[in-house]
Amino acid sequence: MSGQRGFDFAPWGIGWSAWAETHQARRESVFALSNGHLGWRGTLDEGDPCAVPGTYLNGVFERHPMPYAEDGYGYPDSGESVINVPDGKVIRLLVDDEPFDIRTGELHRHDQFLDFRAGTLRREAHWTSPAGRTVTVRSERLVSLTHRAVAAISYEVTAVDAAVDLTVLSEIVANEPLPEVHPDERVMAALRGALMPVDQFVVEGRATILHRTENSRIGVAVSMDHHVLAGGSVTVETEASDTLARTTVSTRLARGDSIRIVKFVGHEWSDSLTDAALRDRVDAAVTTATHLGWAALAEQQREYLDRFWACADVTVEGAPRLQQAVRFALFQVLQAAARAEVRSIPGKGLTGPGYEGHTFWDAEAYVLPVLTYTLPDAARNALRWRHSTLDHALRRAKQLHLAGAAFPWRTIDGRECSGYWPAGTAAFHINADVAAAVIRYVRATGDIGFQRETGLEILTETARLWVALGRWDPQGVFHIDGITGPDEYSALVDDNIFTNLMAQQNLRGAAAAARAHPDAARSLGVTDEEIEAWTATAAAMAVPFDDERGVHQQSAGFTDRERWDFERTEESQYPLQNHFPYFDLYRKQVVKQADLVLALQFAPESFSPDETARAFAYYEELTVRDSSLSASAQAVVAARVGHLELAMAYLAEAATIDIDDLRDDVDDGLHIAALAGVWTALTAGFGGMKHGESGLQFSPRLTAPLTRLDFGIRIGPQTLRIHVEPDQTSYTLSDGPALSIRHFDTPVLVESGSPLTLSTPPLADPGPPPSQPARRAPEDPGSRTR
């Protein structure tokens, strides 16, 4: 699992010096800018060379046929895939009629830098054309966090050694080529050229082009305008056609002179607005941007990020590269969700076409915990999006002959897009993951209005699903049979322990919310008898345990299966699903990603410390981490049971999964959930944070190379900062009422304005560290963190 280095180190950003044809798509993903509504991949300004062009609007997709070799009842009949919307970031340059192309002439310098505090991508190129003319090109782009539909570019060209004639072609380009996001040609045929032209306009130099997707009938409008600053004579002309809008700026620069062009681009979409209304909306966005200008947009961007980092920043000392990776992870999580505003959080965010742009369970399980404690408005909006899709979930459950709601395994607009039954529809835990996110959000924020108006209905309908899905045995135990848990190397199992414990939380949370809001519950048809049934079902939930081995079972009978032959599995045969049939994986003890370990993380109160340690050791020997979601969960539980060095190794792996491209798949976009897991590994792992029914607890411990850990969380309207050193921890609370927490097992009261410093108790000997499957141990973290 070794990645290839290349990115420059900086504590508040990430850069790349010089130029290389290799790893271009990876850089485009890492340097992507987005705000949850709009995403621009980090392609070069001139659009060529380009590995994977990409401009995305959250919620814009094309519907396509879902091909099956043999159809079956309940299979989704159509799928959804993200498409490129018209690309407004393209700025082409001609120097004395020679195209600026870094592959020709002589490139003296080329630097790109993604700034986590400014929220911009900067670029500088010093280039001599084949004809011998030298120019410096400096650009800076942003996708606004304060104006959701707006992106902007500041583009400056300086003549270095002689006077030159310059032509700048600023463009919006529609129907750029889409990478192969699906292996079936019938699907790709529906996605190529998905945008059908509707209209185009040029008004006083502002160009707008409108399109509509052929099958999903989504309208898309992209508009651009410019500020041109130059000392000499300049000509500006703008034109538009069905697939291209272009503003041409021409001038002659004397030696040492510069021209600066600021490009403002607006992006809007709707499946309900008229073309005229959509055009007016995008025009208004560009008008706002041009009135503000670059300086004000950049200042607002910095102010927004200053507010975010004031709470969200995680400081680590002793591991400089880990510090960069942690901030990169948080910045990308922020970008994926900040202005999504009742839209989903896709698995790749808006950084690439991977996973066809779909949203999965990991949005609620991995991303929303970070947002809940650092940017709660974004967490609330993400949950409001789930609520907005409830009608689809209710219809899906009815189709499956179940009560309540069945949220989709993968989707863009709320309809099921997974055609693979065992790891799609059967992965019912998605419903409890959504419910858990509701419970966590309300617990952390105290947002009772949200609980009553939105959360209660989600909790009610998901609770109804579990009652309908499970069965009672003659001994009065409730079982959930024939489902798939988080581990995708096991399918259609009985009593997956993660699913059962999450369903148990779901049922109890629904009962508590219904009792808290009886009138709202009655309006949903909830009766006292149903509340009692939820409570009884939760109390009777099956939790499989192997008495002979003294360990919990990932699912009923799991520990009795034959173990996978790890010793005879070569490193080149990982990931296993690419080299072995699923039927063989399904019947063996081998774990793709943390499953029972996730249960240890998400439901720690269900396991004693001794049970946790034994279960973690047992499943370490089986977990091959063929999923990006595993390392952070293993880091959390390794830290909780005292294996701090192992936790550090897993943290380092999670933190560098994208910047080192550990899985050789960053070309298609970043792993947003895995990046979110970095925050969790630090706060819940080394910070020892738990937040359950009994309140907020911290059990912080550090190990080399970490010498200090500092992080903040939002609790209601207040910010609590936790400052961890090897032998003590300080808690500092912002203005407001005192907060009760537990430091390890000791209840304490933190008062605003009075930092509380407490010592760290000695760590009990956790015993020898558990072993991993042959050739699957995490690497020494030192090579990744320093």
Image (cartoon, rainbow, N blue to C red):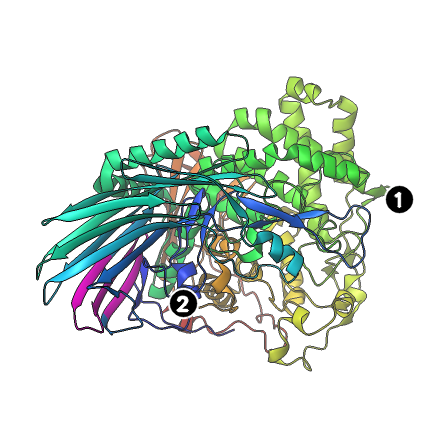
- Residue 568 inside the magenta-drawn segment: no
Amino acid under disc 1: Gln
Mark 1 or 2, which is nearer the eye? 2
User: Which mark is on residue 273?
Assistant: none
Using the rendered image of the protein, determine whether residue 773 is visible from the camera's viewpoint.
yes
Of 167 and 318, nearer the camera is 167
Q: Quadrant of residue 505?
A: top right
**SS for callout 2:** helix
Magenta-tinted stretch: 109-138
For this orientation, the residue located farthest to the top is 519
User: In the rendered view, would you say 479 is above or below 386?
Assistant: below
Q: Residue at x 76, y 65 (%)?
A: 586
User: Left or right: where does residue 119 sit relative to residue 502?
Assistant: left
Of 168 and 356, nearer the camera is 168
- Residue 112 inside the magenta-drawn segment: yes
Q: Earlier in the sequence, mark 1 or mark 2?
A: 2
Residue at label 1?
A: 475
Q: Which percent across, then down, holds residue 488?
A: 68, 60
- Please identify the dominant SS of the magenta region: strand
CA separation, marks 1 and 2? Answer: 60 Å
Q: Residue at x 28, y 71 (%)?
A: 18
Residue at label 2?
A: 24
Alpha-carbon neighbours of circle 2 within 10 Å: few (<14), some, or many (≥20)?
some
Amino acid under disc 2: Gln
